[in-house]
Image: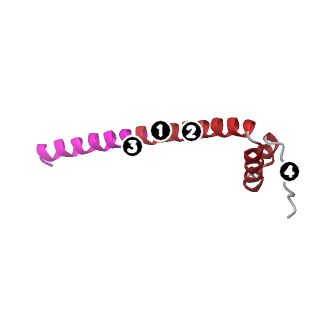
């Protein structure tokens, strides 16, 4: 191989590594942002259900219809799902 081709291949490898690093950083930030959104939504909803019985009832129905793991259901004092059905 020529020196120029060797240099270009090395540069390509460095660029691939930089791209992977940036992609990883972006994915990590996206996960952090998503977690933060979930925390904020949860805090707002929890505050709303303290103040509004109708909202509380609606959220409890929503949770009951969507939570399938017993340890999650226990957090919200929901009955466990029948494993046989």
Viewer-side residue, 4 vs 30: 30
Give the tally of numbered discs.
4
Residue at the location (27% across, 39% down)?
Answer: 14
Residue 35's label in the rendered image is 2
Residue 80 x, y percent position in the rendering:
85, 51
Which label lies toward us, 2 or 3? 2
Residue 15 x, y percent position in the rendering:
27, 42
The quadrant in which the C terminus is found is bottom right
Question: Which residue is denoted by mark 4 in the rendering?
Answer: 80
- 18 drawn magenta: yes
**Helix, strand or loop status at disc 1:** helix
Question: Which residue is denoted by mark 3 in the rendering?
Answer: 23
Q: Tell me how far mark 1 sits from mark 2, CA to CA.
A: 11 Å
Name the image quarter holding residue 51: top right
Question: Which residue is denoted by mark 1 in the rendering?
Answer: 28
Tell which circle, 4 or 2, labels the residue nearer the N-terminal end. Answer: 2
**Helix, strand or loop status at disc 3:** helix
Tell which circle, 1 or 4, labels the residue nearer the N-terminal end. Answer: 1
Q: Tell me how far mark 4 sits from mark 2, CA to CA.
A: 26 Å
What residue occupies the far bottom of the structure in this picture?
Answer: 85
Span shown in magenta? 1-24
Q: Residues within 10 Å of mark 3 (few under 14, many from 20)?
A: few
Viewer-side residue, 2 vs 26: 26
**Helix, strand or loop status at disc 4:** loop
**Helix, strand or loop status at disc 2:** helix
Q: Residues within 10 Å of mark 4 (few under 14, many from 20)?
A: some
Residue 20's label in the rendered image is none
Which label lies toward us, 1 or 2? 2
Q: Residues within 10 Å of mark 1 (few under 14, many from 20)?
A: few
């Amino acid at each position: 191989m020529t020196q120029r081709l060797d240099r270009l291949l090395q540069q390509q490898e460095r660029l691939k590594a930089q791209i992977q690093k940036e992609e990883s950083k972006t994915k990590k930030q996206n996960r952090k942002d998503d977690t933060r959104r979930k925390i904020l939504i949860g805090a707002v909803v929890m505050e709303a259900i303290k103040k509004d019985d109708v909202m509380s009832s609606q959220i409890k129905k929503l949770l009951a219809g969507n939570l399938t793991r017993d340890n999650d259901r226990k957090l919200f004092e929901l009955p466990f799902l029948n494993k046989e059905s």
